Image (cartoon, rainbow, N blue to C red):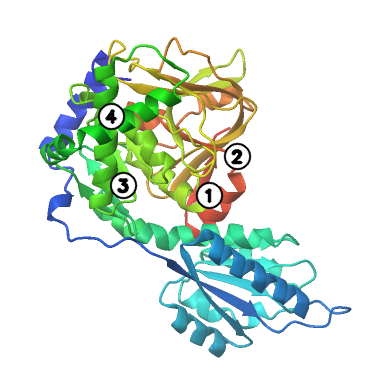
Amino acid sequence: MCEHCNRREFLGSGVLTALASTGAWSYTWASQAPAAEPPGKVRICVLFAGNPGPADRGWNADAEQMEKARQVLSECETRLGNIELVVGQSTSNEQTAALLEQAGQGVPVLAINLNCFALTHLVQPVLERRHPMAVFSLPASGHDWMYPMRWQRAGHRVTLFVSSDYGELERALRLLRVIPMMQKSRILLFPPARGTAPACSPELVKERLGAEVLAVEQAAFDEMMAAVAEDVVREEAERWTKGAKQIIEPTEEDILKAARVSIALQQLMERYQAQGLAVGTCMGWLPRGFPCLGFARLRDRGLPAACEGDMDSLLTMMLFQYAIDKPGFQGNATFDTARNALWTAHCTAPLKLDGRDGPEAPYLLRGHSEVGGSGCVPEVQYRVGEIITRAKFVNLDTILASTGKIVEVPEKSIRGCRSQIVTEVKDAAAMAANWSSALDTEDAMTLLHRVVFYGDQMQNIQHMARLMGFQVIVEG
């Protein structure tokens, strides 16, 4: 959708102007904020509960299994690179309390049960101090697996992994790190923000997630753009040009403008040591160059970036980036009940939905579909047959989620936004009838957008929701 449409003018700029005039948004300008250091590593406390027992009898893990867990944890710490594990063993509440003091206030906990009822006898300090906790329990390592979800239902932020797969330890660490990484995050916003009211409030985002939201002055960014070296701009333009399967509408000038914006956005994120970006004015950027190539560049490098100022979509991308190291494709939805299909389409999309070390998807360079084909945006062609998860974190307390399978990707889009996927879903008619029914808003962008990730992420969503105190609504 674009601001040149009547609906955009009614639901978009008019509403935004009214909100701005009432002072609904209040931000600290990035230029006035204290300098930030890179976020660095986050701590996770690993609690081995109890003592290992004999290998041939009893309800317990044995010494070999404990050593295997230690080895896997050490490998995960090295591989993930941004976590620091504080590892200890406890047989009492007093020892647990001492380990928590060593780890630090509020540090997430990964508890590994070693013996029958060991965890239940020493977990009280974790619960009393409100540490988020993931419990890993091997088969026959005790009966303690029954209690973590009871603690969760009683209001504690606890989730459970009951499995013989030691790979689940890495999944637990990835999900636990989301909490402290969000607390260390800095978000840059070109106002206005869009989305649910809580997500548009810097104060509530800080209170709920710990992330800092700073506003960027357009004039200051324009100065940064003007200062980008010409050879760097041409190098970026050449990278996009050489990689494209085809260049259809964009002129050389269009590509150079978009390349300049792309480099300037990367420099902006580096200057302010930011981990997320939302641009609420992007539809007005045609004269300076659309930010769509820049959004793709950032997302491919692990820095979530949301167009149309959509703070809910941005926070969704940040949560998943920290949890699974994959970017998201933010897009508009439209249904085809005749095919039991749901489309997602937008004019900005990352190339590396597999993650920053994964392959680039094929793409065309196109003009933006809603401003007469002007500008330069990527039309990315994702993999047919891929299972995807469609999600959105709304109101700072709820994750909307569904899964599907990509059944079609156009060779060249002819309507809607440029990058498109058609996904087969369980019941398109029911999804359409209940779309965004959980949202108390009439704002089109807030109702419309979802973020697509490769893979079935529903278990990760459920674990994340328990650890962070969210609710989950399955949409499909």
Disc 4 target residue:
234
Question: Circle 2 sits in a helix, a strand or a loop, which is it?
Answer: loop
Disc 2 versus disc 4: distance between alpha carbons? 35 Å
Disc 1 versus disc 3: distance between alpha carbons? 25 Å
Disc 1 versus disc 2: distance between alpha carbons? 10 Å
* Mark 4 residue crowding within 10 angstroms, few (<14) / some (14–19) / many (20+): some
Residue found 36% across the figure and 40% down from its top:
298
Question: Circle 3 sits in a helix, a strand or a loop, which is it?
Answer: helix
Question: Circle 4 sits in a helix, a strand or a loop, which is it?
Answer: helix
Q: Nearer the viewer, mark 3 or mark 4?
A: 4
Question: Circle 1 sits in a helix, a strand or a loop, which is it?
Answer: helix
Q: Is residue 271 above or below residue 352?
A: below
Q: Nearer the viewer, mark 2 or mark 3?
A: 2
Disc 1 target residue:
324
The answer to whether mark 2 and mark 3 are in CB contact below 8 A is no
Chain-order first, disc 3 or disc 4 = 3
* In this rendering, position of residue 187 left or right of residue 332: left
The residue nearer to you, when weighing 361 against 434, is 361
